[in-house]
Image: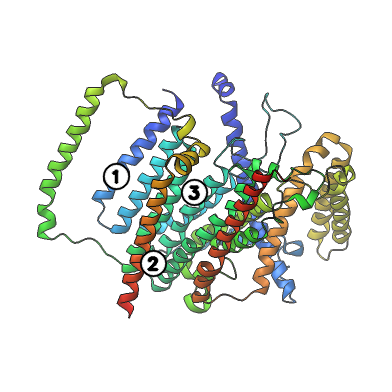
């Protein structure tokens, strides 16, 4: 047993990493629903969830319990096997795509059993990086389409058809809009794409792909929002027309699986936007500004103190107990990032990547609180007649600029 | 038995089972799903041979784009369980004959080449993205462009046919 373990340390570490990442992603998913409800509520001058736990922080837990214990009926005449398969497929594919994302540049500051541990599951030299991700998302259509078909009901079928048409249409623009970035990096590997944006260390934020690839970013983000079926492209579940679209007949945990899949793909898309257009884990400041290394602490310590302050005055006893505890953990983390230099060095990449991911998640929620839904013909016209031509023009422009640089050696 | 060999057998079994189930399933959607299993298992086999790019493209193009259209059309036509006519029952006999002939042909070829048949690890030109793009856009650029043109003509033809029906 011991010999087997030592021979497969790499495998064991990977499995532990997968379990950890799953746990983190699912927890983030749960709190993303809380975050979304809070933000949308404040956009609409409401309070949002605030009954379950302090500031409604236990609401995701209550929702989870509710999903688990609700009755789970199967509609009469449904194709049983496919009906069960569809939510599984949607969730599994959404979670798999997270595995491709690298979360930090350096290995952990300490070795585990003689192994350097990098953040992220995929191997460092995964040379098909972004292609592998597109392969996984290409299969994601089935979850929605099969759910709609297998429910044996008219609204889900219409929702499923709409959604597969929409996803197939926007996948083209999605893939084409990335080509510019790939041309500039000369690689499919996500790590290479980030490192290519650091070619001018002193430029900071100005060196990121978003400036030369602004057209590509516009197309990518729009197409990605459409791929994840979020507002304003949530036609597959347009409640005024289709009840709830493809998941009308799903209840209980099967519905929760679609829900988690949707939020997980939101996270993946946010990661991709950050990595491909916003420099991934690169700092927006020039590399010579070492003082910005304390920025995580500068944000975390006041935030932690604020949570403690808020918690001490909270109206329920439970809140008065929990909030100061959470606040002191946050403040202690911030302090640790100052005191331990190796941890400080290590935390820079993940800190910036996470801030960018959070920003994009906020933009997602913000759009949901702001934009009305497209009409179906508008949606199709927008994808085929605007996004696709623009992304093709972007590819041609980028190729010409790169060719010109190669020809005349301009730097 | 090494780990890659085990993975190979699992994927190969999946592909064969998927292919058999594709024929035996009564409902078109189940058949289409079986075909997707075959495509994905094949992509896994390509990955095992070190052809990452081909594996990814196999899933994107065959597993994703083409099979989505299959499923889409089946859903749109709301095709039910396939019906067996008298001709389709008769068609089984020559089909069986063809299967036997094909199996014999493959077996004969394998027997002839004997021990030299083994899994080839694709390295260099065929496996890397760079090698493939150099082949497609440098050595075979004219056939490649010609094929693209052919597909474009087919798309235009389909559009013209669809338009005529409407008008």
Which residue, given by chain and number where applicable, does mark 1 sit on?
B19
Q: Residue at x 36, y 56 (%)?
A: B150
Q: Nearer the viewer, mark 3 or mark 2?
A: 3
Disc 2: CA contacts within 10 A as few (<14), some (14-19) or many (>=20): some
| Residue situated in front as seen by the camera: A188 or A394 | A394
Task: State the separation of the CA atoms marked 2 and 1.
Answer: 30 Å
What secondary structure is marked by label 1? helix
Which residue, given by chain and number where applicable, does mark 2 sit on?
A75
Q: Residue at x 67, y 49 (%)?
A: A275
Tell me the chain of label 2: A
- Residue A378 vs A390, above or below: the answer is below
* Discs 3 and 2 share one subunit: yes
Q: Residue B18, image x and y in percent? A: 32, 45
| Residue situated in front as seen by the camera: A24 or B152 | B152
Q: Residue at x 56, y 38 (%)?
A: A127
Q: Residue at x 26, y 52 (%)?
A: B25
Tell me the chain of label 3: A
Disc 1: CA contacts within 10 A as few (<14), some (14-19) or many (>=20): some
| Residue situated in front as seen by the camera: A46 or A386 | A386
Q: Residue A145, image x and y in percent? A: 43, 62
């Amino acid at each position: 047993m011991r010999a087997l373990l030592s021979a497969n340390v790499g495998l064991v570490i990977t499995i532990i990493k997968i379990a950890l990442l799953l746990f983190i992603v699912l927890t983030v998913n749960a709190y993303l629903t809380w975050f979304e409800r809070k933000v949308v509520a404040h956009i609409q001058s409401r309070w949002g969830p605030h009954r379950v736990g302090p500031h409604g922080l236990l609401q995701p837990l209550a929702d989870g319990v509710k999903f688990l214990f609700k009755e789970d009926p199967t509609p009469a005449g449904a194709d049983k096997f496919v009906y069960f398969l569809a939510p599984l497929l949607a969730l599994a594919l959404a979670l798999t795509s997270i595995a491709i994302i690298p979360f930090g540049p350096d290995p952990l500051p300490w070795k585990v059993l003689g192994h350097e541990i990098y953040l992220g599951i995929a191997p460092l030299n995964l040379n098909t990086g972004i292609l592998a991700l597109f392969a996984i998302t290409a299969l994601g259509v089935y979850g929605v389409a099969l759910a709609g078909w297998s429910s044996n009901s008219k609204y889900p079928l219409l929702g499923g058809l709409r959604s597969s048409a929409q996803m197939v249409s926007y996948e083209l623009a999605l893939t084409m809009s990335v080509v510019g970035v790939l041309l500039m990096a000369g690689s499919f590997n996500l790590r290479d794409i980030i490192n290519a944006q650091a070619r001018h260390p002193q430029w900071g934020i100005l060196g990121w792909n978003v400036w030369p690839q602004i057209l590509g970013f516009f197309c990518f983000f729009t197409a990605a929002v459409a791929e994840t079926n979020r507002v304003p492209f949530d036609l597959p579940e347009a409640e005024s027309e289709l009840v709830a679209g493809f998941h009308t007949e799903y209840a209980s945990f099967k519905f929760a699986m679609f829900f988690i899949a949707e939020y997980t793909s939101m996270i993946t898309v946010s990661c991709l936007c950050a990595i491909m257009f916003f420099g991934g884990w690169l700092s927006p400041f020039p590399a010579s500004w070492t003082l910005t290394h304390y920025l995580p602490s500068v944000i975390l310590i006041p935030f932690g103190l604020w949570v403690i302050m808020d918690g001490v005055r909270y109206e329920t006893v439970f809140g008065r107990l929990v909030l100061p505890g959470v606040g002191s953990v946050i403040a202690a983390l911030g302090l640790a990032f100052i005191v331990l230099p190796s941890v400080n060095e290590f935390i820079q990449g993940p800190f910036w990547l996470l801030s960018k991911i959070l920003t994009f998640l906020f933009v997602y929620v913000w759009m949901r609180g702001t934009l009305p839904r497209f009409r179906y013909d508008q949606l199709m016209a927008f994808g085929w007649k605007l996004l696709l031509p623009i992304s093709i023009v972007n590819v041609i422009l980028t190729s010409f600029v790169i060719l010109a640089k190669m020809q005349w050696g301009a730097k | 038995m090494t780990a890659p060999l085990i993975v190979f057998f699992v994927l190969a079994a999946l592909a064969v089972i998927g292919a058999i189930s594709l024929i035996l399933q009564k409902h078109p959607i189940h058949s289409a799903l079986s075909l997707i299993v075959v495509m994905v298992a094949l992509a896994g086999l390509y990955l095992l041979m070190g052809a990452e790019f081909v594996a990814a493209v196999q899933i994107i193009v065959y597993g994703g784009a083409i099979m989505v259209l299959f499923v889409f059309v089946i859903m749109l036509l709301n095709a039910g369980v396939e019906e067996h006519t008298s001709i389709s029952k008769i068609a089984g006999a020559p089909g069986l004959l063809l299967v036997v002939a094909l199996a014999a042909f493959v077996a004969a070829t394998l027997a002839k080449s004997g021990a030299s048949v083994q899994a080839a690890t694709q390295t260099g030109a065929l496996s890397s993205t760079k090698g493939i793009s150099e082949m497609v856009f440098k050595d075979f650029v004219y056939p490649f462009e010609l094929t693209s043109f052919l597909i474009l003509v087919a798309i235009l033809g389909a559009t013209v046919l669809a338009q005529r029906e409407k008008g």
